[in-house]
Amino acid sequence: MKYNNLRNIREDNDIKQKELAALLHVSQNTYSQYETGTISLTAEVLIKLADYYNCSVDYLLDRTNNPVFKKEL
């Protein structure tokens, strides 16, 4: 499954795949495969990316179009 929001949020923030790959300690090719859905995102990767972008995991997985993260108390 291709993750459009994952790619869009990266591009909207002018971030290169190589930069995120370094943050996640993976190769640029591996990160590219996350975006295209060639390989599955792990929970650890999703949490790191959601924290990095300050958005919800659901947004990164295209389950919502709202990137705003609402933290429950």
Image (spheres, rainbow, N blue to C red):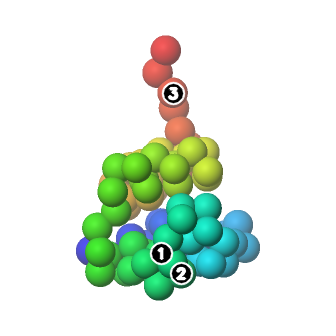
The residue labelled by disc 1 is 31
Q: Residues within 10 Å of mark 2 (few under 14, many from 20)?
A: some
Marks 1, 3: nearer the viewer: 1
Query: Which is more toward the observer, 49 or 68?
Result: 49
Q: Quadrant of the N terminus?
A: bottom left
Answer left or right for 22 relative to 50.
right
Whether label 2 touches label 3, CB < 8 Å:
no
Q: CA distance from mark 1 to mark 3?
A: 27 Å
Whether label 1 touches label 3, CB < 8 Å:
no
Which mark, by number, is residue 28? 2
Give the amino acid at mark 2. Gln
Instruction: Name the outermost residue toward the front.
Output: 25
Marks 2, 3: nearer the viewer: 2
Give the amino acid at mark 1. Tyr
- Residue 8 visible in the snapshot: no
Q: Secondary structure at mark 1?
A: helix
Q: Secondary structure at mark 3?
A: loop
Instruction: Name the outermost residue toward the right.
Output: 14
Instruction: Name the outermost residue toward the top.
Output: 73
The residue labelled by disc 3 is 71
Looking at the image, is 25 positioned above or below residue 17?
above
